[in-house]
Image (cartoon, rainbow, N blue to C red):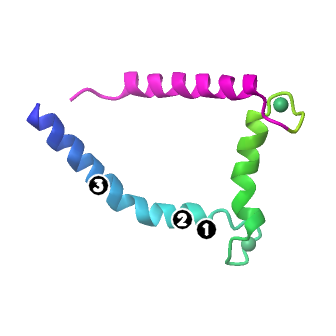
Amino acid sequence: MKTIITATALLLASTAALAQPNMTDMLMKLDADGNGSVSLEEFLKPYEMQFKHLDQNGDGGISQAEAEQFVKQMQQHMQQMRQQAPKQ
Ligand SMILES: [Ca+2]
Ligand SMILES: [Ca+2]
């Protein structure tokens, strides 16, 4: 049990160490026109795509049913991730 906790802690620590440069890269990848700065429009683009993905019937709004559908998909995805995760 202690080994699992240690392994998890190490994994989390290395993920945290990697997270910073990756986050910067991810942010700067949003610079679509390549002018060296991420505008509000560029920054919001992934959210817009996420919104469009959520708005399945394309009526410009996310209904309760669409939100529930999304949560269901997320839960299924999380469950799959947990099942695929290597056991230590
Ligand atoms: Ca830009
Ligand atoms: Ca909709």
Q: Pointers 3 and 1 in contact (CB under 8 A)?
A: no
The residue labelled by disc 2 is 25
Gap between marks 2 and 1, in whole Å?
Answer: 5 Å
* Badge 2 amino acid: Asp
Disc number for residue 64: none
| Residue at the front extreme of this rendering | 64
The answer to whether 23 is drawn above or below residue 75 in the figure is below
Task: Specify which label sits upstream in the sequence, 2 or 3.
Answer: 3
At label 1, counting other C-alpha atoms closer than 10 Å, the crowd grade (few under 14, some 14-19, many 20 or more) is: some
Residue 61 falls in image quadrant: top right
The residue type indicated by label 3 comes to Ser
Image position, residue 56 (x, y; %): 80, 29
**Which residues make up the magenta segment?**
61-88
Image region (quadrant) for ligand 2:
top right
Cα distance between the residues tagged 3 and 1: 22 Å
Q: Mark 3 points at which residue?
A: 14
Residue at horizontal 63 percent and vertical 63 percent from the top = 29
Q: Circle 1 is placed at which residue position?
A: 28
> Can you name the residue that lies furthest to the right here?
59
Q: Do the residues labelled 2 and 1 touch (CB within 8 Å)?
A: yes
User: Is 43 left or right of 58, judged from the image as shown?
Assistant: left
State whether the magenta stretch is mostly helix, strand or loop.
helix
Circle nearer the N terminus (3, 1): 3
Above or below, 55 against 46 in this view is above
Q: Which residue sits at x=74%, y=63%?
A: 42
Helix, strand or loop for disc 3: helix
Q: Quadrant of the C terminus?
A: top left
* Residue in the foreground of this view, choosing between 44 and 81: 44
